[in-house]
Image (tube, rainbow, N blue to C red):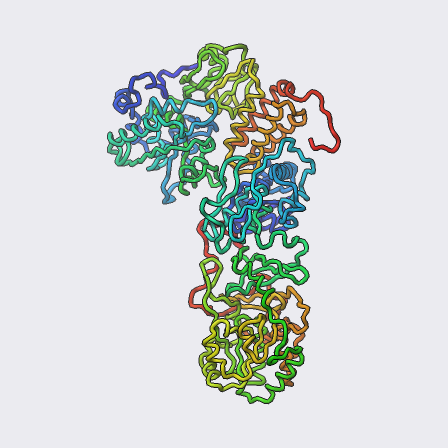
């Protein structure tokens, strides 16, 4: 494993006043600008493509590729929307970048906007991040004053206006088109695709939506080159990532690591071992990922490819650990309730399906359910997944199916012992 | 045109069509709830799931938001697509009340229809029902909302956003608690509000006026044209045992799409009230035959220039044509005109036009002038002994002027559908059939010829069409050439004479009508339904 020579995302986390422009500049901030403005926008896109940087929001789509989808010469404005609506259960790393190094994000925004020829960026911040919003607003004001944002940035002739927008705390606004709707002042409901946001997004203009960590990784790439970045991590998952760790571990927290560390090593080295018993299961990247059993954790590594091979997703890279005493039924109930509550209610399978699953689980926990209900849950999960506008229904059904399949025994303990069928009643 | 294959059947469809429309237009039924041809695509009901062949294998997509591409292969009834369609239906019905027998939408409910076709007949909810609330919420002058029946397809919301652009409706709350409502302080009473009940695929939005009045499967539908204004929206007249229950819009892509205004929708009531029932001669009521015989005797004794005729933009083309023919053969054509006294009414840029009569252009087509000042002056001066007023109500529309003009006329003969003021003032009044009780044609403001059919056959034998009345009178006056058996025959005779109708017969007029080469009568250009920038346009 090749550790990075220098931290990319967490460089200033331990530096006093790292969030201020003064300290940011002292520690090499806005260092990518010299390289950036020397390149043509298309070259920046190519550079990011070559680095192999993947979107850190959960889907893991190649960032450079996404940028290249922006149609040229449409005469419309091009927008960058920064997704700082970090709402995935168990995920908590974007907020530290916003807290400790807001200028790194701004520098990333500058690089991205230059690459896609956008002159307006919106940072959509989760409503609960009150402090972070204050920090970001101050950072934007400082950067404008110092000429790192605004008109004719550092004499390059490039203009960029950054707006910090506070969301109202809906999970679905973290979905890119839901975020766009919300930014437009509407109810946060994902849009039907096509058209994709890169073609027709915010205010019907081409829009790129990127995650905070994705953008925060860009300045390093511009400064040190795509080749250097691609060398870090694994062949399919380049670079470093800000991993989070929570749940039943002796030490929770967040660490910047290159991709490719084995899961167990991560838990042992950084989590100092599982707390309160043996390892039972792990959500590798937020609650929307299919769960991994202790056995699967032994072979999985923290990168996109290995996660996919193990039937789950890299997700947000924030690992949630569950020990042997955890009741998987109640874990699932808690998750399903969350998704039922956060479903926007637009598509039938998600609106009805999530609530149905939630009610079925309530029935299971009440000890009134039968095997039939358990099978019904799996089938409803099948009917929800991939049949809706956005992936919220899949985010509910994937962990649900994996938990029921991998821990079916626990569910069966909750079922009614004997079933008396009274003729003429509906089960 | 693009070649595609749906369920193994090859077809050519216009470019830009979506897969759902392509299938529907070619007789392959795919159930859908939220999709409406004349509204933007929402794609939220997830019922029109079909499979598309891609290099990566078959892919499930929604038909309504997938545009056809050359060589596309679509499966609408493959195992996967059927499963998706059925599961969407199951989800829609999860908390939906299963009380079709007492729901007013039963019989024309899409949810019910699809359940009969695709239902699983194995109710699997197995948890208590979630009650969404509110029965019969009063949300507007004409509309009632049954909250628990709503499937949140948002058709009504898109309609009020896109057509009247009044945006009274919205969905509040998230997830399964989402529900349709009106914005606080608003009411759903725009002039087109009734349409939301037509496009509602379930029994959530119903008309106060129609609900629980009649089961829809008893209704007989007749192709017709709204006479409420000179737009000529296509409607279907729905009646049972001669009793009119409602006017529904009938699709016409270029005229009214699938909309009608509330004014037109509720106008059916006026054809059942205040009707003129009997033939009246002076103070006596008599039979039609007797009335015509007596009138013919009176008219026979008058000179060619002693009788004037008032034709009407309310009457059909055939009525006016025979009226014209009567004057040509018996009296003087110069003494026939159609003064229009009807005041301008409500209008907008959507459907409603200010000219509240259906057939002004029909008069133009026949060459009957609407500039009747000279004729009216002559009538006023007492130049005519008899004046025949056909389907007009001058005394109701402009009493003072009417008294001045018609005051000296000895024999004021009035043909009227309703017991109007004019019918009361008349020396002789004959009851006529309104458009619901006869067949005929109207020409709308844009010169679009449209046909309406007989919906209700009245029991009263004295109730005849104006054209038949004229034929009877002509025969009583011993004129030749009035031997018409029915309205189509009259139209066909007219079409042979009139160059603008060349080659047409009554039966060959398409249900969508026929554009004639006429100059619009109204000075304002005819705009049609204004192209909405956000409306998803389907090219016919």
Could you tell me if residue B460 is visible in this image? Answer: yes
Q: Measured from the top left, where is residue B505 in percent x and y?
A: 62, 70
Q: Measured from the top left, where is residue B69 in percent x and y?
A: 54, 45
Residue under the point 44% across and 51% down: B533
- Left or right of B11? Residue B165 is left
Image quadrant holding the N terminus of chain A, namely top left
- Left or right of A427? Residue A353 is left
Q: Nearer the viewer, residue A184 or A312?
A: A184
Q: Residue A83 occupies which quadrant of the picture?
A: top left
Residue under the point 56% across and 38% down: B132
Q: Nearer the viewer, residue B12 or B128?
A: B128
Extreme residue in the front direction? B283
Image quadrant holding the C terminus of chain A, namely top right
- Left or right of A269? Residue A412 is right
Q: Residue A243 occupies which quadrant of the picture?
A: top left
Extreme residue in the right direction? A423
């Amino acid at each position: 494993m090749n550790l990075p020579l220098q931290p990319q995302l967490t460089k200033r986390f331990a530096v006093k006043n790292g969030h201020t422009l003064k300290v940011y500049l002292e520690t090499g901030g806005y260092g990518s600008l010299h390289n950036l403005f020397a390149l043509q926008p298309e070259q920046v896109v190519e550079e990011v493509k070559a680095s192999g940087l993947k979107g850190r929001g959960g889907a893991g789509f190649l960032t450079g590729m996404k940028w290249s989808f922006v149609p040229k010469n449409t005469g419309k404005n091009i927008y960058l929307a920064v997704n700082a609506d970090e709402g995935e259960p168990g995920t908590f790393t974007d907020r530290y970048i916003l807290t400790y190094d807001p200028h790194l994000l701004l520098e990333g925004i500058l690089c991205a906007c230059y690459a896609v020829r956008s002159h307006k960026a919106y940072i959509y911040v989760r409503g609960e991040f009150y402090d972070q919003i204050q920090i970001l607003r101050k950072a934007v004001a400082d950067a404008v004053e110092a000429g790192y944002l605004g008109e004719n940035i550092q004499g390059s002739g490039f203009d960029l206006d950054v707006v910090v927008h506070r969301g109202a705390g809906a999970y679905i606004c973290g979905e890119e088109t839901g975020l766009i709707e919300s930014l437009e002042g509407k109810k946060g409901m994902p849009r039907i695709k096509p058209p994709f946001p890169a073609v027709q997004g915010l205010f019907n203009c081409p829009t790129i939506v990127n995650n905070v960590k994705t953008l925060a990784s860009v300045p390093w790439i511009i400064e040190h080159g795509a080749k250097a970045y691609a060398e870090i991590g694994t062949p399919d998952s380049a670079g470093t990532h800000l991993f989070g760790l929570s749940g039943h571990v002796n030490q929770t927290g967040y660490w910047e690591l290159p991709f490719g560390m084995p899961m167990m090593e991560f838990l042992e080295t950084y989590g100092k071992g599982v707390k309160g018993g043996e390892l039972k299961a792990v959500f590798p990247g937020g609650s929307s990922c299919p769960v991994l059993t202790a056995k699967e954790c032994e072979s999985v590594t923290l990168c996109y490819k290995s996660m996919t091979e193990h039937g789950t997703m890299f997700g947000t890279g924030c690992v949630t650990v569950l020990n042997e005493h955890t009741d998987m039924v109640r874990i699932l109930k808690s998750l399903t309730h969350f998704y039922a509550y956060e479903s926007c209610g637009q598509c039938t399978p998600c609106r009805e399906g999530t609530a149905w699953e939630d009610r079925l689980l309530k029935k299971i926990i009440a000890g009134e359910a039968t095997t039939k209900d358990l099978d019904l849950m799996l089938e409803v999960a099948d009917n929800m997944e991939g049949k809706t506008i956005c992936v919220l229904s899949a985010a509910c059904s994937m962990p649900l199916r994996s938990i029921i399949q991998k821990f079916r025994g626990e569910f069966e303990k909750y079922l009614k012992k004997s079933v008396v069928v009274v003729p003429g009643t509906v089960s | 045109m693009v070649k595609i294959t749906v369920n193994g059947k090859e077809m050519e469809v216009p470019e830009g069509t979506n897969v759902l429309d392509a299938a529907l237009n070619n007789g392959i039924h795919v159930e859908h709830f939220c999709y409406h041809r004349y509204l933007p695509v929402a794609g939220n009901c997830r019922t029109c799931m079909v499979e598309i062949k891609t290099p990566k294998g078959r892919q499930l997509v929604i038909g309504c938001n997938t545009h056809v591409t050359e060589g596309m292969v679509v499966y609408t009834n493959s195992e996967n697509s059927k499963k998706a369609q059925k599961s969407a239906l199951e989800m829609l019905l999860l908390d939906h009340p299963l009380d079709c027998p007492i729901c007013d939408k039963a019989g024309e409910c899409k949810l019910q229809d699809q359940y009969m076709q695709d239902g699983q007949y194995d109710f699997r909810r197995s948890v208590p029902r979630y009650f969404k609330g509110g029965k019969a919420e009063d949300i507007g002058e004409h509309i009632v909302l049954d909250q628990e029946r709503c499937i949140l397809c948002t058709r009504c919301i898109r309609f009020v956003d896109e057509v009247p652009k009044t945006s009274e409706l919205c969905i509040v709350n998230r997830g399964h608690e989402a529900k349709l409502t009106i914005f606080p302080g608003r009411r759903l009473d725009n002039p087109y509000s009734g349409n939301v009940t037509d496009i509602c695929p379930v029994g959530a939005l119903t008309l106060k006026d129609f609900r629980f009045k009649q089961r829809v499967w008893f209704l007989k539908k007749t192709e017709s044209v709204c006479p409420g204004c000179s737009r000529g929206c296509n409607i279907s007249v729905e009646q049972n045992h001669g009793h009119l229950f409602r006017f529904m819009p009938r699709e016409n892509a270029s005229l009214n799409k699938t909309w009608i205004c509330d004014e037109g929708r509720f106008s059916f009531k006026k054809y059942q009230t205040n009707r003129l029932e009997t033939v009246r001669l002076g103070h006596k009521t008599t039979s039609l035959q007797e009335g015509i015989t007596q009138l013919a005797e009176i008219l026979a004794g008058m000179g060619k220039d002693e009788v004037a005729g008032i034709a009407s933009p309310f009457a059909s083309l055939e009525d006016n044509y025979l009226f014209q023919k009567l004057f040509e053969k018996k009296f003087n054509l110069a003494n026939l005109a159609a003064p229009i006294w009807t005041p301008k009414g409500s209008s907008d840029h959507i459907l409603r036009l200010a000219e509240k009569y259906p057939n002004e252009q029909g008069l133009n087509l026949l060459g009957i002038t609407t500039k009747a000042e000279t004729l009216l002056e002559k009538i006023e001066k007492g130049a005519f002994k008899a004046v025949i007023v056909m389907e007009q109500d001058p005394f109701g529309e402009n009493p003072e002027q009417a008294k001045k003009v018609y005051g000296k006329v000895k024999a004021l003969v009035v043909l009227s559908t309703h017991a109007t003021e004019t019918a009361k003032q008349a020396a002789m009044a004959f009851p006529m059939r309104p458009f619901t009780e006869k067949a005929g044609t109207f020409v709308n403001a844009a010169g679009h010829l449209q046909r309406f059919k007989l919906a209700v056959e009245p029991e009263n034998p004295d109730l005849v069409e104006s054209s038949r009345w004229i034929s009877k009178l002509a025969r009583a006056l011993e004129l030749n050439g009035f031997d018409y058996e029915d309205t189509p025959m009259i139209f066909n005779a007219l079409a042979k004479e009139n160059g603008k109708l060349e080659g047409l017969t009554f039966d060959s007029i398409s249900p969508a009508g026929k554009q004639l080469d006429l100059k619009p009568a109204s000075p304002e250009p005819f705009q049609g339904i204004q192209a909405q920038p956000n409306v998803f346009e389907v090219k016919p």
